[in-house]
Image (tube, grey):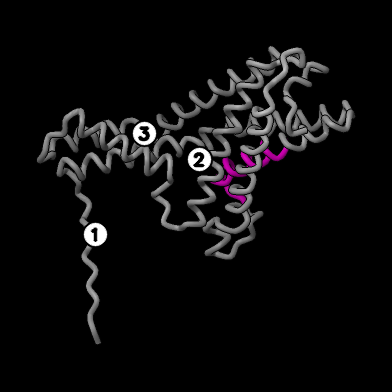
Amino acid sequence: MFTSNPFADLTVFLSPRVMQVYIVVMILAVAVGTVLDMLHKGSAEFFVRQRKKSAAAATKRLGVVDNTSLAVRTFMKEVLTSGEFCNPKRRISHLLMFYGFVVYLVTTIGMVFAYPVPDTPVPAAWPVLWNIGALMVLSGGYWFFFFIRVDVAKEGHSPFRLMRADLFIVSLLASVTFALIWEFVQTTGNLRATQIAFALYIFCSTVLFVGVPWSKFAHMFYKPAAAFQKRVEEANGSSSLPRPAEVRYIKR
């Protein structure tokens, strides 16, 4: 189960080309959805306006080296290590989901395009990494969903009290959960059960990627951009944010 390509067995009832086209369509859906979300919220216009405002108020001119350094620092902190999260549990949960999803997504694309049929044996590392990535997403995601969410951990609401903001995490967990269920059902040899599990997997995946304009999916692209802009403003002297106050302890 963990060392075989689950997508190669789709040839029993589905052409490999269909899955390849589906992945391309979902990539386009994410790109289009992100653009629509930016237009609806005015994010692109905001960043352009903020960039011009920062340049006009700057007291120090930044060169290519300075901007590159700021970009690298932003990438290392806000992207690779999620350093913006002060809560260590939230940070670990996010990192599990982030790296797990990257591994899961890359191996999915690799197996679907490079090893689409059983006649092209897949290296054992690919399905193993696919399962590891999926389990990382589920461990970090369910931990966040049931125990770390603000409305659950701080406000005492039921984790099953859902709002539109939960569309991303719910569709992500549903998609990856049904992916593993589908993989397991394949081993039973029951074609109808396999088809049903696969249909649920595809449905939840479609909701995840097509629902970008209504979920927090696009948020992952905005946060690094906002963090980079903040660093630029602090470096060129145009930031209007107050500096952190110095903490003083008064002896009593």
Q: Distance between the residues labelled 1 and 3?
A: 29 Å
Mark 1 and 3 residues: CB-CB less than 8 Å, in contact? no
Q: Where 123 falls versus 222 (above or below)? A: above
Q: What element carries label 1?
A: loop
Label 2 crowding class (10 Å Cα cut-off): few <14, some 14-19, many 20+?
some
What residue is pinned by disc 3? 42
Residue 205: name its quadrant.
top right
Name the residue type under label 2.
Answer: Lys
Residue at image point 76% right, 29% down: 198
Q: Where 44 falls versus 13 (above or below)? A: below
Residue 167: name its quadrant.
top right
Residue 124 pos. (x, y %)? 69, 27
The tag on residue 244 is: 1
Residue farthest to the left, as pictured:
59
Name the residue type under label 1.
Answer: Pro
Name the mark nearer the viewer: 1 or 3. 1
The tag on residue 216 is: 2
Residue 171 is covered by the magenta coloring: yes
- Residue 204 in the figure: left or right of residue 49: right
Name the residue type under label 3.
Answer: Gly
Q: Which of 117 and 202 is in front in this view?
A: 117
Q: Which of marks 2 and 1 is nearer the N terminus?
A: 2
Residue 125 pos. (x, y %)? 65, 29
Q: Tell me the magenta residue range.
A: 162-178
Residue at image point 57% right, 36% down: 101
The tag on residue 153 is: none
The quarter of the picture where the N terminus appears is: top right
Name the mark nearer the viewer: 2 or 3. 2
Q: Earlier in the sequence, mark 1 or mark 3?
A: 3
Mark 2 and 3 residues: CB-CB less than 8 Å, in contact? no
